[in-house]
Image: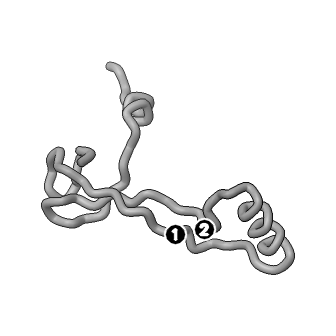
Amino acid sequence: MPKAYCRCCGKQTAHKMVMKRVQTQPEGWQGFQQFLTMLMQGQHYYQMEQQYFCRVCNQQNERVKQHDRLAGARVS
């Protein structure tokens, strides 16, 4: 289980990761071409995104990568 900071709990807790389908899909001719391209290349038809949920309170959280956290830190 990946651990991440939960704002609701206020501490590092175990999180479960769930894959959710992205809702925006192209329509019409462009969507059909994209479908055929993905089918021929063997990729997944639906684009997926990761969602993280706290195992303690079941609150959905964004998982921040370590280098993103360090980039936002200020040194005084």
The kind of residue tagged 1 is Arg
The kind of residue tagged 2 is Tyr
Residues under numbered marks 1 and 2 in contact, where contact means CB atoms less than 8 Å apart: yes
Name the residue beneath numbered marker 1.
Answer: 21
Left or right: 67 in relation to 21 = left
Q: Estimate the x, y position of residue 7 in percent, counting from the top left.
A: 22, 54
Check disc 2: other Cα within 10 Å, few if <14, some if 14-19, many if 20+.
some
Q: Estimate the x, y position of residue 63 in percent, counting from the top left.
A: 36, 49
Q: How many labels does the image show?
A: 2
Left or right: 26 in relation to 15 = right
Left or right: 27 in relation to 51 = right
> What's the residue at 61%, 62% (across, down)?
44
Name the residue beneath numbered marker 2.
Answer: 46
Q: Is 63 situated above or below 37?
A: above
Q: Estimate the x, y position of residue 14 in percent, counting from the top left.
A: 19, 50
Task: Compare residues 49 and 7 and report the one nearer the observer.
Answer: 49
Q: Estimate the x, y position of residue 74 in percent, counting from the top left.
A: 37, 26
Q: Is mark 2 on a helix, strand or loop?
A: loop
> What's the residue at 60%, 68% (across, down)?
46
The C terminus lies in quadrant: top left
**Could you say which quadrant of the image residue 61 lies in?**
bottom left
